[in-house]
């Protein structure tokens, strides 16, 4: 008898009364049956997906920022390499495109999304991003997300996740986007759903584009730029590190390329910025190129009289203050950095750690609205980087778009007017004030400046475009206006606004 025949005979011995084949263990009476129902056997998912889910819950539950939550979480759980990159894209991509995915999920769930438990909704969003926004095979996206649901929200909801994600997967991304556009009641609603921004922000951005002389047809390009992960940009602080030294010191897989506009900007093409020695010791730093441009423009603005004492009125967390201090050191000027929040004032001191002794006159903790009365005419140059909605940096802080509301504007624009008025009081006659916001919203930019100047007859506008050109030595494409508005989809920077004002009397 052959071995094959022996196996066949053994198999016949294990058949039950109905002729069904039994396993060897069961034939011996060892049942070994799992205590879990089949739908519950896959519990949990990989650490990267779990980390992304935990970031979303922290952002939603504690109003935290993903860029402050994710890095320490990855370090704590020892998630590195490709897994860390996957977790980062999954968390940030889901936050950026939440509005788009909610519009899709609303068509796949049999109840209003607001009636779902928030953790369950976050699981669905993570699954939708894997299916529609990442190169994850459909079976893996569904099964791993279902496993995450079982581990974090329960077996019952996991069955719903399975059904909903299969409906999502039945249509590809282009098909969903066509459907969202077709069903939208107007162009703003279409852009809001497809471009994943609240409708009020879409309207504000359209108005800002028009106010800057641009075509509102660029709105979708601007929203797409907001939804693209920005590259890390470094600033080589003048006099503290030479550009060639910054690139020569790069190691550990770090690759740098010159910035597009600012002579101090370098784009990190790969690697960890902290692997650059000049970043680690404060001679360089991580700073958006638009943020660099507005500080450089203030330093390049024409001044009547002495140029000895500068003020950063709202200095936290310290990037602009450090660049201004480096520039001031080259001219023999001193910098006062003021910040209302003590913890942010500590960040300013840390950012200024490489500046030569004697350049930083003081890092103060105080309300900038009081400084004009406390030191009237005491400064030659003043930076007012005013608190704002942050609509210009949504690509860096994607969760902000879901937190801000139109109601925020009333408080912020009042504060902005008061800070600008204080800065104009603090600057001497002939001195220059830079009014800066990381927002293109007209209510926070042009209207604030117009309103403050309407009440004064001792201030004139300077050509901020000319100052940017003088600071960079490059032809930066800007609207034919005296103020400057940068755009992510045009300049590759945050949407920074700059107005330059000179005290005349």
Image (spheres, grey):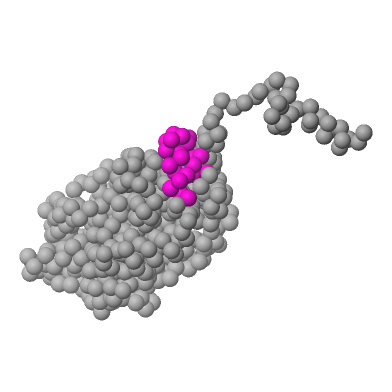
Residue 482 at x, y percent in the picture: 22, 75
Residue 443, visible in the rendered structure? yes
- Whether residue 230 sits left or right of residue 503 in the image: it is right
Residue 18 at x, y percent in the picture: 69, 29
**Which one is nearer the viewer's eye here, 304 or 84?**
84
Q: Please report the residue visible at 44 percent of the width from the left and 43 percent of the height from the top.
A: 161
Residue 60 at x, y percent in the picture: 34, 43
- Whether residue 321 sits left or right of residue 52 in the image: it is left
- Whether residue 122 sits left or right of residue 377 in the image: it is right
Q: Is residue 232 magenta?
A: no
Q: Please report the residue visible at 52 percent of the width from the left and 44 percent of the height from the top.
A: 144
**Which one is nearer the viewer's eye here, 271 or 102?**
102
Figure check: 293 above or below 366? below
Range drawn in magenta:
144-166
**Which one is nearer the viewer's eye here, 60 or 501?**
60
Residue 26 at x, y percent in the picture: 70, 25
Quadrant in the picture for residue 99? bottom left
Q: Quadrant of the C terminus?
A: bottom left
The furthest residue to the right: 1
Q: Please report the residue visible at 58 percent of the width from the left and 54 percent of the height from the top.
A: 252
Q: Main secondary structure of the magenta part?
A: helix
**Which one is nearer the viewer's eye here, 340 or 106?**
106
- Whether residue 498 sits left or right of residue 370 in the image: it is right
Q: Quadrant of the N terminus?
A: top right
């Amino acid at each position: 008898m052959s071995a094959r025949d022996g196996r066949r005979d053994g198999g016949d011995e294990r058949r039950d009364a109905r002729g069904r084949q039994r396993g060897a263990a069961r034939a011996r009476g060892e049942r070994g049956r799992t205590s879990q129902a089949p739908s519950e056997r896959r519990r949990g998912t990989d650490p990267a997906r779990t980390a992304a889910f935990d970031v979303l819950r922290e952002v939603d539950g504690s109003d935290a920022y993903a860029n402050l939550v994710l890095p320490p979480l990855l370090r704590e759980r020892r998630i590195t390499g490709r897994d860390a990159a996957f977790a980062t894209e999954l968390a940030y991509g889901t936050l950026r495109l939440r509005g788009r995915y909610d519009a899709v999920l609303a068509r796949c769930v049999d109840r209003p999304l607001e009636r779902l438990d928030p953790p369950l909704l976050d699981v669905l969003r993570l699954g939708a991003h894997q299916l529609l926004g990442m190169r994850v095979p459909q079976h893996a996206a569904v099964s791993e997300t279902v496993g995450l649901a079982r581990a974090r929200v329960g077996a019952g909801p996991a069955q719903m996740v399975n059904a909903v994600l299969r409906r999502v997967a039945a249509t590809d991304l282009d098909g969903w986007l066509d459907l969202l556009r077709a069903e939208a009641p107007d162009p703003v609603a279409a852009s809001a759903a497809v471009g994943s921004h609240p409708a009020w922000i879409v309207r504000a951005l359209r108005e800002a584009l028009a106010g800057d002389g641009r075509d509102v047809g660029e709105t979708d390009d601007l929203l797409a730029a907001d939804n693209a992960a920005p590259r890390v940009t470094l600033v080589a602080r003048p006099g503290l590190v030479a550009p060639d030294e910054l690139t020569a010191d790069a190691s550990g897989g770090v690759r740098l390329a010159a910035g597009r506009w600012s002579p101090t900007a370098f784009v990190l093409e790969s690697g960890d910025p902290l692997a650059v020695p000049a970043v680690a010791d404060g001679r360089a730093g991580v700073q958006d190129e638009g943020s660099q441009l507005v500080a450089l423009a203030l330093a390049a603005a024409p001044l009547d009289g002495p140029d000895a004492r500068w003020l950063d009125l709202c200095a936290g967390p310290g990037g602009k203050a450090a660049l201004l201090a480096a520039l001031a050191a080259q001219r023999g000027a001193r910098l006062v950095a003021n910040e209302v929040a003590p913890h942010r004032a500590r960040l300013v001191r840390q950012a200024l750690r490489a500046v030569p002794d004697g350049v930083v006159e003081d890092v103060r903790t105080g309300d900038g609205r009081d400084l004009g009365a406390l030191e009237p005419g005491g400064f030659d140059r003043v930076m007012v980087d005013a608190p704002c909605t942050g609509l210009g940096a949504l690509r860096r802080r994607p969760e902000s778009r879901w937190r801000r509301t139109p109601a925020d504007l009333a408080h912020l624009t009042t504060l902005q007017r008061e800070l600008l008025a204080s800065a104009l009081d603090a600057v001497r006659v002939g001195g220059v004030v830079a009014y800066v916001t990381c927002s293109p919203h007209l209510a926070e930019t042009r209207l604030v400046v117009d309103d403050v100047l309407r009440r004064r007859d001792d201030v004139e506008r300077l050509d901020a475009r000319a100052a940017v050109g003088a600071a960079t030595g490059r032809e930066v494409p800007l609207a034919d206006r005296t103020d400057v508005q940068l755009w992510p989809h045009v300049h590759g920077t945050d949407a920074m606004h700059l107005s330059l004002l000179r005290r005349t009397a």
